[in-house]
Amino acid sequence: MFVKNRGDARETGRLRKNTAWRGLRRAVVSAFFLLVLFVGGNCARQSFETQDSLEKFSVYLDRHIPRLMDQYRVPGVSMAIIRDGELVWSGAYGYADLDHERAMTVDAICRAESISKSVTAWGVIWNETFHSALTIGYELKGSPVPPYVYPTKASGGLFADVKGIACFVIGGMTDSYYKDRSVLGQESIRTLYTPEVEIPGLFGIVADSYGFGYFIETLSDGRQAVWHGGQGNGWMTHFHAVPESGDGIIILTNSQRSWPVMAQVLRACLNIQALKGKKCCHTAT
């Protein structure tokens, strides 16, 4: 009995050690991917130092995106760029389906992953703002049923193409770039961008706070940058915008290996966007 207990104790100790090691490895891997996003854009900075126009940026993307996709084994990427509250460029690279060699296009539908949270936040604000204008439903027996939504897909169930996400981001612009008054007013949009929770620790590197469905950073000139990313089993997504300047970028990919590609594209985008100083694209100096 004694020997058996010693063996059990050793086995328990080994299992605990392995569990702790796996947990440490997961933490290190997660930190590594975050750091890739933060500092991985250094190559793009060197390659794109003097290219300050949209046309040249497009040339840069056409030249470098396929190379980066091949390097990091990313099947497909679709992107959109917003300037002055308008969609001014969109493009796609690679494949939506490798096995069938179906090309990625700007109309290809991707899982938006956690970008869904930002869209859901709009729905919640809209419901509160326009609840009095909604019809009341009535069930079979005639009893009233108030408006409701199914929340099960709210955090990551959205499917969209890159132009659809771009339209959504444009809808969140403010000041002179606020155009679509059919959904939310500027006051409601600013509610979304109001900091609710400070972000401590490692994640504080990429944002100052979290509002209502948006990560938020106050830039050096006092304006806000708002963004959200998403990661799921097979997809990675990201949008970043400065609502007061009408500028933004959206990147959708069908690979979980897309961190370095996103980092370099976002870093290069600093040269044509009003996103200068945003934390997610800082490079080590």
Image (cartoon, rainbow, N blue to C red):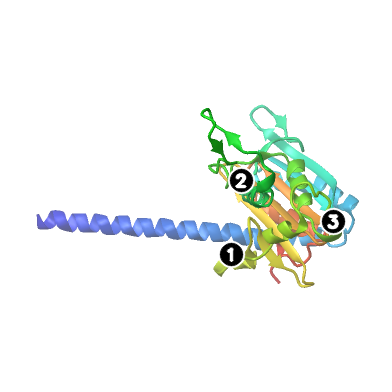
Where residue 275 sits: x, y (%)? 78, 62
Rendered-image quadrant of the N terminus: bottom left
Q: Quadrant of residue 174?
A: bottom right
Find disc 1 in the rendering and name its residue: 203
| Residue 5 image point, x, y percent | 15, 56
Residue 236 screen position, x and y as percent: 63, 47
Helix, strand or loop at label 2? It is: loop
The circle drawn on residue 113 is 2
Answer left or right for 178 relative to 235.
right
Which of the image's four quarters has the C terminus? Answer: bottom right
Q: How far apart are the two marked residues, 2 and 3, measured between alpha carbons?
A: 27 Å
Q: Earlier in the sequence, mark 2 or mark 3?
A: 2
Is residue 44 among the parts visible in the rendering?
Answer: no
Could you tell which of marks 3 and 1 lies nearer the N-terminus? Answer: 3
Q: Which residue is mark 3?
A: 177
Q: Earlier in the sequence, mark 1 or mark 2?
A: 2
Does 51 appear above or below 144? below
Residue 267 location (% of width, % of height): 75, 59
Identity of the amino acid at label 1?
Answer: Phe
Looking at the rendered structure, the kind of residue marked 2 is Glu
Q: Return the mark for residue 74.
A: none
Q: Could you say which is closer to the camera, residue 217 or residue 203? A: 217
In whole angstroms, how far apart are the C-alphas of marks 1 and 2? 19 Å
